[in-house]
């Protein structure tokens, strides 16, 4: 070894790193919404109302919203490898769910999980920028988002079945154990690129105010807040709504919710593959933002099974297709570094997770108040239009990034317009 760093995106070991990140994201996704299809059982077991049980999804979203930016600063100082070890350990705390004898203790495991999510989301962009080349960014980000979608789909499908066979807390333990295995693998396999110093460049705290005021970051955060809040809300409450309104069994509701998640995987793949062919970012945000409210409405208004099964898959695709773009745009902003990108992503996702706390709680509160899900669902569906507005107003980063890369490499790039 000559000690010189290989060009970014050329080391074969990057595939090991990518696979390790994918497993961590699958484990994280499995526990993110895992209580949602089990709400009815948790209500009966712990004696809480609908607004309270929604906090099992809302509390992690609120904690992520509050802690993600500070966690991103901490991750920039600790370095990505240690940050991912810490994050993986914390998300594995949901394995303690069977020991929770009351709602407060169960909520505590969800707070620990949220802290781990903050560390993972903050550290992952730096790992991706250090190991993968510019042309691979959207693909790798898409794979990580796909991993989250796979995890959510798995928990929606298997959670009710494990709960029926054993008990609801056994399902939460199982999904936490997957995160624990993924963390052990990262401890064994995670490392810095060869030839690069392990020393972490300090993140300048004084740069944070200007990053918080950046127009592109604020617009992206507002758009993600609307769309992600809508998707989290519907994914959380639709299984319960279908049980109450359409008299679905627990397994039927979980299976239908798993269909939503399965097509979320399709959306993640499209969101990672299409930008490599069409290097524009804004159209993905605009199209998803316009169509999300339409198909969200179909998921709760349609009482014809065929129509419902037509709306659920499209809603699942739309809910995930824009997420790889959300992770990629900050990497393409001017003067971005691996240390800064995690903070920028943290700012954007903080806004999205804040709405992920408010929206589900609002739906549960209005359901208890009015006896119907309709008002809450209607309000939340319309909020997704913020993503379309953000996509229309923010600058295009994809073409600038591709053109700069091509010129630096001396290549000629043919761009296909959307």
Image (cartoon, rainbow, N blue to C red):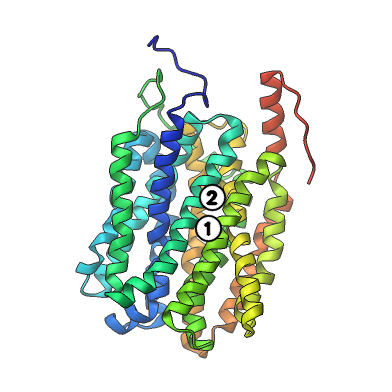
**Residue 196 picture quarter:** top left
- State whether residue 51 is above or below residue 268: below
Asked if residue 70 can be seen in this view, the reply is no
Q: Are marks 1 and 2 in contact (CB under 8 Å)?
A: yes
Mark 2 Cα within 10 Å, few/some/many (few <14, many 20+)? many
Task: Please name the residue shown 31% across and 67% down the image.
Answer: 171
Which residue in the rendered view is the most extreme toward the top? 2
Q: Quadrant of residue 386?
A: bottom right
Seen at 74% across and 52% down, the residue is 392
Compared with 10, 206 (above or below) is below
Residue 234: x %, y % from top left = 54, 71
The dot on residue 72 is none
Q: Is residue 116 left or right of residue 97?
A: right
Residue 288 spot, x, y in % from top left: 67, 59
In the rendered image, which residue does mark 2 sit on? 348
Residue 19 on image: x %, y %: 43, 40
Camera sees residue 411? yes
Asked whether, in this view, residue 345 is left or right of residue 290, the answer is left
Q: Nearer the viewer, residue 412 or 341?
A: 412
- Residue that appears at 42% across and 52% down: 26
Q: Which of the labelled discs sits on residue 352, or is there none?
A: 1
Q: CA distance from mark 1 to mark 2?
A: 7 Å
Q: Quadrant of residue 331?
A: top right
Indicate left or right for 4 with 355 as reference: left
Which element carries disc 1, helix, strand or loop?
helix
Q: How many marks?
A: 2
Residue extending farthest to the bottom is 371
Q: Residues within 10 Å of mark 1 (few under 14, many from 20)?
A: many
Figure quadrant of the N terminus = top left
- In percent of width and height, residue 410 lies at 71, 18
Q: Secondary structure at mark 2?
A: helix
Tell me the residue at 67%/53% (across/down).
285
């Amino acid at each position: 070894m000559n000690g010189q760093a290989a060009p970014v995106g050329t080391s074969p070991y990057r595939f090991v790193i990518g696979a390790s990140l994918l497993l961590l994201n699958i484990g994280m996704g499995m526990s993110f919404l895992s209580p949602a299809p089990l709400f009815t059982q948790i209500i009966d077991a712990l004696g809480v109302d609908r607004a309270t049980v929604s906090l099992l999804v809302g509390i992690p979203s609120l904690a992520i919203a509050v802690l993600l930016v500070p966690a991103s600063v901490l991750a920039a100082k600790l370095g990505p490898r240690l940050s991912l070890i810490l994050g993986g350990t914390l998300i594995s705390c949901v394995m303690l769910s069977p020991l929770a004898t009351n709602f407060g203790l169960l909520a505590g495991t969800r707070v620990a999980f949220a802290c781990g999510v903050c560390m993972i989301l903050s550290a992952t962009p730096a790992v991706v920028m250090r190991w993968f080349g510019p042309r691979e960014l959207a693909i790798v980000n898409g794979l990580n988002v796909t991993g989250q979608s796979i995890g959510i789909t798995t928990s929606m499908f298997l959670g009710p079945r494990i709960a029926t066979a054993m008990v609801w807390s056994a399902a939460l333990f199982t999904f936490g154990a997957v995160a624990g295995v993924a963390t052990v693998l990262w401890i064994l396999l995670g490392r810095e690129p060869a030839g690069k110093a392990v020393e972490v460049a300090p993140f300048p705290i004084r740069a944070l105010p200007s990053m918080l005021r950046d127009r592109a970051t604020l617009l992206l955060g507002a758009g993600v807040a609307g769309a992600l809040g809508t998707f989290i809300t519907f994914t959380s409450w639709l299984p319960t709504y279908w049980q109450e309104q359409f008299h679905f069994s627990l397994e039927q509701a979980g299976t239908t919710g798993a269909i939503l998640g399965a097509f979320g995987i399709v959306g993640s793949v499209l969101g990672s593959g299409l930008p490599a062919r069409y290097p524009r970012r804004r159209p993905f945000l605009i199209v998803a933002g316009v169509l999300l409210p339409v198909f969200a409405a179909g998921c709760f208004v349609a009482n014809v099974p065929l129509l419902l099964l037509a709306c659920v898959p499209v809603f699942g695709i739309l809910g995930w297709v824009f997420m790889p773009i959300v992770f990629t745009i900050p990497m393409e902003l001017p003067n971005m570094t691996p240390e800064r990108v995690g903070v920028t992503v943290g700012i954007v996702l903080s806004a999205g997770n804040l709405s992920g706390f408010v929206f589900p709680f609002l739906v549960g509160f209005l359901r208890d108040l009015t006896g119907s899900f309709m008002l809450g669902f209607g309000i939340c569906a319309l909020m997704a239009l913020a993503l379309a507005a953000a996509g229309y107003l923010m600058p295009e980063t994809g073409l600038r990034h591709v053109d700069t890369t091509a010129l630096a490499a001396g290549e000629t790039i043919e761009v296909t317009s959307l």
